[in-house]
Image: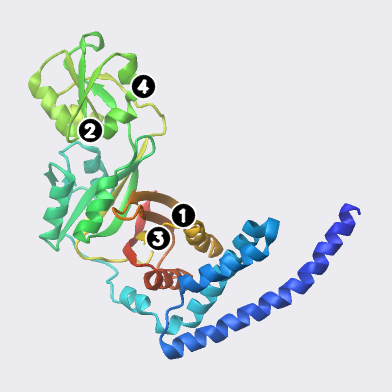
Amino acid sequence: MSLIDIRKEIDAIDRQLVPLIQKRMACSLKVAEIKRAENLPVYHPEREKQILDRVEDQGGEYGQYVRNIYRSIMTVSRALQNETLFIDNCFAEKIASIPSSLEYKRVICQGAEGAFSHAAAINMFGDGKFEFYKNFEDVFTAVSEDETAVGILPVENSTAGYVTNVYDLMLKYGHWIVKATALDVSQNLMSCGALNEIKTVYSHPHALKQCSRFIKEHNLRAIEFENTALAAKYVAELNDPTVAAIGSATAGELYGLPIVSRAIQDETDNITRFIAISKNPFIDPSSNKVSLAFEIPHEKGSLYSMLGRFADLGLNLTKIESRPAGHNFEYRFYIDFAGNVFDRKVQELLSSLEKELSYFVFLGNYVDKM
């Protein structure tokens, strides 16, 4: 049999399959109407597992492939049912009640004047009077005590990875992400001494990681500090030629610490993302990024199925991070995707996830200045 003959056979099989799939989708709509009448949830995990196990067994040597095909069919069927039930959507009502803007009187940064969070604050809110707190949780506490305050925090770096404790604090305090921005980060070695005199370097753990190659090549002892700018201030006060700090050129100028070596980061394109958090949410109509946190069962195919739902809607995932949820080896996922919650398909997806998942948190929809 030739390739042309096999393709003709495949086409003939597809002509039989499509009407059957149409009939199955029509049955899904009937199921949706019954679920609406009886106030039943769309997602029925036990029923789906029964079907998947059954078709995998029937599929014989192709069982796992058949299971994957049916998982996609059920994902699409579930989306169709959610669309049918969208008239009863409470998530859309909650979104509609969120204001499109809020006026903030205080902008709080983690670190000190001259830190990269200071530059991020200027990028998002313009020049103004900023307040500085020593650690991440201090920022969250200050924001929780003042509805007119926003906090500026780093969440990820292209070299050093995610600042995971910031997201954990987001959930602990129940704050919202209201803005985001990305900065090109140039790390500099600063000291009152010459390069060949320096033995010890201070900086934030992420900055040290971003410059690990330089630190190793020059046999420097790296000591973690709360913040790059605070490290620069500390080293300037020591006035010891054997000690240096890693941080921004702005911090060096601010604290009178000369730059010994510029742009010492391992990667030329060294970018850090920052977010602005608020006790109260607002959603700018032009928002382009959505952040979520959720947990899924620790079972085969659950993550694959979840991610497939975003792909089916043409939604671009820009970040996915997992963190242990602390029980039964289950994981909490943090996801960012490009989108706006006033888009009906986004509302349908978030509504269905909120109903289906035992743990689901909408962290915000905001303008991300890339």
Q: CA distance from mark 3 to mark 1?
A: 17 Å
113 with respect to 41 (left or right): left
Q: Amino acid at mark 4?
A: Arg
**Which residue reaches farthest bottom?**
37
Q: CA distance from mark 2 to mark 3?
A: 33 Å
The residue carrying pointer 3 sits among few (fewer than 14), some (14 to 19) or many (20 or more) residues within 10 Å by Cα, namely some
- Which of these two is toward me, 80 or 153? 80
Sequence-wise, which precedes: disc 2 or disc 4? 2
- Which of these two is toward me, 12 or 127? 12
Q: Are marks 2 and 3 in contact (CB under 8 Å)?
A: no
Q: Which residue is mark 1?
A: 317
Q: Amino acid at mark 2?
A: His
Q: Which residue is mark 4?
A: 213
- Above/below status of 290 relative to 235: below
Q: Are marks 4 and 1 in contact (CB under 8 Å)?
A: no
Sequence-wise, which precedes: disc 2 or disc 1? 2
Q: CA distance from mark 4 to mark 1?
A: 31 Å
**Which residue reaches farthest left?**
237
- Which of these two is toward me, 45 or 163? 45
| The disc label shown at residue 296, or none | 3
The residue carrying pointer 1 sits among few (fewer than 14), some (14 to 19) or many (20 or more) residues within 10 Å by Cα, namely some
Q: Amino acid at mark 1?
A: Leu
Q: CA distance from mark 3 to mark 4?
A: 38 Å
| The disc label shown at residue 204, or none | 2
- Residue 129 appears in the picture as rendered: no
- Residue 307 appears in the picture as rendered: yes
